[in-house]
């Protein structure tokens, strides 16, 4: 818990010491938390490596949030085929059932963006249920930027989508904070 709080506060020193304590207790949790922290600090290479280690130490029974975060890291690096493989593991795991539909749709939307498939991303983003979440709004902002710049949109619809994009850009000024991680973190299977 201390590690989660320190990560949320971006307190590097406290997070590192809290995360280090996890290594002796639970290697999966250690590598997962370390990956999350490295991602938030901007070291996406280390974050991906740690996410892969979390999966490795999960043996044959990875939890949802481990796989979701690994897919998230792969998408951030535009390793789309690898991300697809991880998402298929999530979809094919009967233990997960239909849980966390919005996280799955969000990851699929991010994957479509990474593949420059903006029309697919647009339609996937429409399927996300909680349109009030920060991760939805950031994802939708990025979808609309790609969709409006790369797809034919009738003028009547373009005006509406431009207004939505303007609102979202004002709400989230930075373009590099793709953030599904709070929703992923809140899932415990």
Image (cartoon, helix red, strand yellow):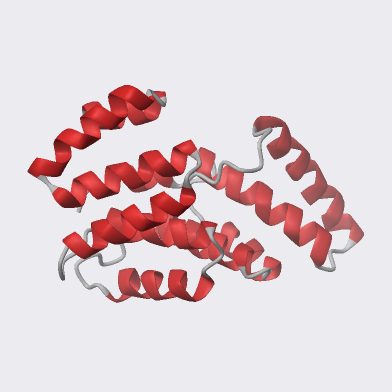
Q: Residue at x 45, y 56 (%)?
A: 73
Which one is nearer the viewer's eye here, 58 or 123? Answer: 58
Q: Which of the 4 image quadrants contains residue 11? A: top left
Q: Residue at x 26, y 58 (%)?
A: 53
For the N terminus, give its image quadrant: top left
Res 62 seen here: yes
Which one is nearer the viewer's eye here, 137 or 60? Answer: 60
Where 52 falls versus 187 (above or below)?
Answer: below
Residue furthest out toward the left:
25
Where 10 falls versus 57 (above or below)?
Answer: above
Q: Residue at x 51, y 55 (%)?
A: 128
Residue 96 is situated, as x and y percent measured from the top left of the image, at 24, 64
Numbered marks: total: 0
Residue 13 is situated, as x and y percent measured from the top left of the image, at 33, 23
Q: Is residue 177 left or right of residue 55?
A: right
Which one is nearer the viewer's eye here, 74 or 118? Answer: 74
């Amino acid at each position: 818990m201390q590690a989660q709080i320190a990560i949320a506060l971006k307190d590097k020193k406290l997070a590192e010491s809290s995360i280090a304590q996890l290594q002796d207790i639970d290697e999966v949790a250690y590598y997962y938390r370390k990956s999350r922290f490295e991602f938030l600090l901007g070291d996406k290479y280390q974050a991906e490596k740690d996410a892969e280690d979390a999966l490795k130490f999960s043996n044959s029974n990875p939890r949802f949030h481990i796989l979701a975060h690994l897919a998230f890291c792969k998408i951030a690096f535009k390793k789309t085929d690898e991300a697809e493989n991880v998402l298929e593991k999530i979809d094919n795991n009967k233990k997960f059932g239909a849980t966390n539909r919005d996280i799955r749709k969000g990851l699929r939307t991010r994957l479509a963006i990474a593949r420059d498939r903006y029309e697919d991303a647009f339609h996937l983003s429409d399927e996300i249920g909680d349109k009030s979440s920060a991760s939805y709004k950031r994802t939708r902002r990025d979808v609309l930027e790609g969709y409006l710049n790369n797809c034919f949109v009738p003028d009547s619809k373009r005006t509406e989508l431009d207004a939505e994009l303007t609102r979202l850009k004002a709400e989230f000024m930075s373009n590099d904070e793709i953030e599904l991680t709070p929703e992923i973190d809140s899932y415990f299977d």
